Structure formats: structure tokens, C-alpha cells
Amino acid sequence: MSAADTSQSDRTAPVLDWLATELSADADLELAALVRHLDELGRPEISRNQFHRCLDLLHVRSLAISGLFRDRFATATLPLTVSLHRSATRLVSALGKIAAGYEEVLAEVRHRLVRTVRRNPEAISAKALEILGEQLTVAHLAGNSAPFEFWLRAHSFFRTSKVDNSPDVAAGQAAEGALRAYKYILAFSAAQPEGLTGTEINWLSEYLANAAKNLIIRASLPGEGGFGWLWIDPDQDTPPVSISRREPPEVDGLIYFTAEELARRATALIEQLEGEGEPPGNLPTSLGRAETATLLRRVREYWTSPPHREHPRRRNQYAVSVCCGLENIWKMLREPTTTAQTRLATQWMVVNESPTGYAIMQVTGTASALTPGIAIALRRSPDEPWTLCVVRWIRSETPEQIELGLQVIANTAKPVTVGFRGGSKPRPMRPALVMPPIAALGRQQSILAPAGTYSARRFMLVSDIHRLYIAQGRLLSLDMQTPAVELFQYEIDPYPL
């Protein structure tokens, strides 16, 4: 070994010593060490060959560190605190540097005639795609979208993983590990993770680690209109798009994929979870039985019939008052006074809108305890009724800025309490909102209630705003379930028990 090599080895010795130690339980300390050592390895006096020799160890350690942070991100509400957001940003950046290191290794391999086990492009691409999958997962846990050039990197690694050197990204035979990691990225993205809570994202990530292999990828346009299929352009830094939402452009090299088999397996799991027997084995345990069925039902819908926008969004900019959370909305509607609304509502800005939804951004106050699936009421002026919405997605690029995507479910609502019959234990009355029928949609009058309220066909409804009104209702259909609320149509039972 030359003196230069010895000197370079000495410079990487602290990194290798750290990588040889046991992972500690202090996530912040571990992340700080990872960031520091990656910065040291990026210095010009460290040869790229030395950095590349550390990559596989950094790969293992970074995934372990990310695992330490996952539960912390999952239990936090958006927007993240400044310290937690900083940790997420540093972790995403560190994972990106490791992926960039694998790009360097692949570039070096391409200029060599002899391949070795250590410098095998298929194995390198598989590890890089695994890092990118973790990077995408952490980004969504933090309320962000995929990092810059994420999709270009993913497609490039997948193309390099082809054992038959096929130039077509979707065609050819990919190495098993790379194919599994790439399918994870596609299936995870198709499940609309921006509309999931942190706990749901963690559960889905763990589930897809084994189940994503059932995704089907092809290089040609599917027949029968491509219903349930998505497409992606490997030359663009953009996520997958549903064919039902936008037709693919007439260019070569597009990737098409479907998660229909994933959806079929999800249906079987839902039936088992909602049955009386033992729950399915080998499922993640971070969610309860009912919560798991609710999540699978929602992602199944995204996998089989991805949402398509029926009305174009119009860019706009005007202030609205916003009340977040079903309980706060219920309290505010019971006390329609300026004082109550000042206490329970904050100012937001509408950035675009359509007849069925809004995108809003906070402009005053400090948002907290926001999760996908919660109820939100908004209105433009005090003389207008409150429009009732459900949060479909959340984006939070910084702790000071948060954007919500809203689905309109009613243009007015009345506060009531409901209590379902059945069960061995008495169930308390729960706050709920009665919404009028919508004839154009064929929807009967409906109720928005906290998640877990529905438990039988019949329930009691009590209204005491102007006068006391008590009735027995009969559930007609359960139309929406989120981690926070459920919406069901009902009718007044003409023959109460």
C-alpha cells in the first residue's frame, strides 16, 4: 500500500470505526454522526474509491437510523415541529447522498470491462432503489413530496438493473432485488401517501415491502382503455399518472403499471379482518384490526380506480375562515357567535378551487394537529354558510407553511348527537353533523361522525338547537371512512324499536 493510500485509509478510519459500532437508541445522535461522516467523505482529500468502499455499510446504517425516526414522524401531526422537520430534512438529504454515491459507482462500472461481485450493476441498482424507497417514505412522513430529481434517479437505476442490458426501462429482465424495490416505489406512490396519516404510511410501507411484488409493469399501452392502469415517463421528474386522469403522451419509452392484483389481495384481507375468525398472519401490527381494514379499503380504491378530476381547478386568491376538526366544527355551529368563531377559526388563503374541492394555504396563526381525513369547515364571509370538507392531502415543505387539499362534502350542516345500538357495552352519544340530501348525486341526507361511531344499522339521533328532537335513524350506506371521520347516508326509521 502506498503512502497516499495509507493516508486516505487513515482519513476514513473514523467513519469505519463508527460503522462498526452498535446502533444506539439515540436517533438524533446517530443522524448527526451519519451527516457528519457523509460530509467528511465528500471532502476532496478523500478519494472516491474510499467513499465507494464505505457505501454498503452506510446503506445498512442509514436504513437503521431511518427506522429509529419512523415512529417519531408517524406519531407527530403536521406541520412537524422545527426540530423534527430539521431531522427529516437532514435524513432525506443523507439518503440522497448515499444514492448519489451509488450513481458514481455505476458510472465507474460502465467504464470497466470486467464486472466483479462487488461491482455488479444489478446489485448496486437494487441497493440504490432501496435507499430511494426509504427516502420517498420519509419525505411523505414529513409532509413533503419526492425530492428533486427523485423519479429520474429511480428510473435510471431501474434501467441499469437490467440483466439483459435492455435500453427500454419497462422491457427486459430486471434483477429481482431491483425489480422489487422499484415496484415498492411505484405501488407506494400510487397509494396517494399524501392522503395518509403517519401511522398509516408506516403500516403501508411495511406491508408493501413484501406485497409490492404483485405489481405488474409493462412497456406497451394496455388494452380496453387502460382502466386502472397508470403511466410514467422515465425522462421526466414526475410521479405516476392515472390513465383515467390524463392520457399518456405519444412518446416512446413510457412505463405502464397496474396494482389490480394488490387490490384483489387487499379485498381478501379486508374480508378476513372484518370477519369473526383470526386476523390474517404476517401483517404489520402498528394499526388495529378495524383501522387496517379502513386503510386497505382506501388504498384499494386508489389502486383500482385512481381518482380523476371531474372539474378543472381555477387559480384564485382570497381569504377564508377555517375551522379544523369535527369537534371544533360541532362546537362552533352550536354557538354561532362572533366570539366562538374567533376562538375556533383561523384565516387561510384559497389558492385554487373547483365545484368539488379547494386547495388552501395557511396565512395566519399556527396550524397544529392536522392529519389527512379530518373534517374542515370554511367560509368566505360571515353572512355565508359554512362549507363542510374532508382533508384529502397535506403538504408541508416548511414548519411555517402548510397546504391542504379539500374535498367538499356539503354546503351546510347541523350539529346533532348520535348513538348506535347493539353491542354488549353501552355506547356514549357522539357529536355529529347532519348534512342535507344532494339530489344531483343521488345522495340521501347523511351524517358525518367521528371514526368508529358506526356499529349497527340503527341509531338514535338527538338535536337540541332550537327545540328538542329525538328520532331513530336507519343506516342506508357507509360512504366514507377516514382515520378521523366516517360519512353514512340514513333515513328516519318509521318503525322505531
Image: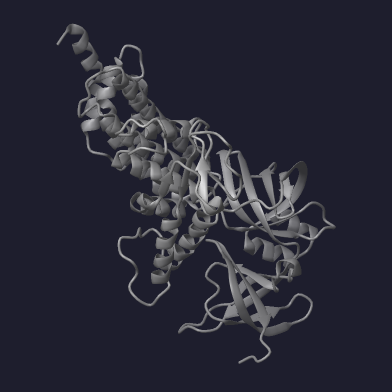
The answer to whether residue 374 is left or right of residue 133 is: right
Viewer-side residue, 47 vs 338? 47
Viewer-side residue, 388 vs 21? 388
| Residue 450 x/y as whole percent | 58, 67
Residue at the location (66% across, 61% down)? 328
Q: Is residue 82 above or below residue 44?
A: below
Residue at the location (65% across, 77% down)? 490
Residue at the location (45% across, 84% down)? 424
For the N terminus, the image quarter is top left
Q: Is residue 94 above or below residue 348?
A: above
| Residue 116 x/y as whole percent | 20, 26
Of all residues, the one furthest to the top in this rendering is: 3
Quarter of the figure with residue 288: bottom left
Viewer-side residue, 283 vs 373? 283
| Residue 245 x/y as whole percent | 61, 48
Residue at the location (69% across, 70% down)? 443
| Residue 375 x/y as whole percent | 63, 59
Of all residues, the one furthest to the front in this rendering is: 223
The answer to whether residue 138 is left or right of residue 46 is: right
